[in-house]
Image: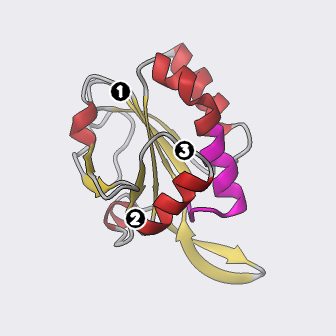
Amino acid sequence: MRPNVGDLVEDFTLPDQDGNNISLSQFKGSPVVMFFYPRADTPGCTIEACGFRDSFAKLKKAVVVVLGISRDTVKKQKKFAEKYDIQYPLLADDEMTLIKGWDLLVEKKMYGKPVTGVARTTFIIGPDGKLVHIFENVKPEGHAEEVLALLKKK
């Protein structure tokens, strides 16, 4: 079930682009930025992922963990990470366990036809494991800077 702001976020484990299992609980004590994106290596997703890549040094300096999550396979996440030199974990939820559990599958229109896809959404989790903020209907351009600005306020 999708957490609400103030809720303790349940632990989960997903493989990253290298096939290593990553659990949310590994990052207890650090803020975590978890952004869900529809598909690796598509225009909007590339803009968003590269925005976090370009802001990664600032986020890392602030001891913020960045996790990108999509329904792509480990292999596709690996190819995406290598192509764009992404230095943070891209988690593969190809069975959509977390995506469905957090109610992030939505009806969209693609070329005028209805399709089901992942809602571009970012969750900010505090060092105590509680959900601090949710960005919904994210616009890829400038989103990483928007997240940084919010983290500076907290």
Quick one: SS at disc 2?
helix
Quick one: SS at disc 1?
loop
Quick one: SS at disc 3?
loop
What is the quadrant of residue 19 in the picture?
bottom left
Q: Is residue 54 magenta?
A: no
Task: Examine the residues drawn in magenta and state their main secondary structure.
Answer: helix
Amino acid carrying label 3: it is Ile
Would you say 124 lies left or right of 142 here? left
- Residue under pointer 1: 126
Q: Where residue 61 appears, x then y in whole percent?
A: 48, 17
Considering the image in quadrants, where does the N terminus appear? bottom left
**Image: 95 above or below 38:** below
Q: Residue furthest right?
A: 111
Amino acid carrying label 1: it is Gly
The reply to whether residue 113 is in sight is: yes
- The residue located at (40%, 64%) in the rendering is 74
- Residue under pointer 3: 86
Using the image as rendered, state which of residue 8 and residue 151 is in the foreground.
Answer: 151
**Image: 146 above or below 21:** above
Would you say 2 lies left or right of 50 here? left
- Residue under pointer 2: 74
| Magenta region, residue range | 38-51
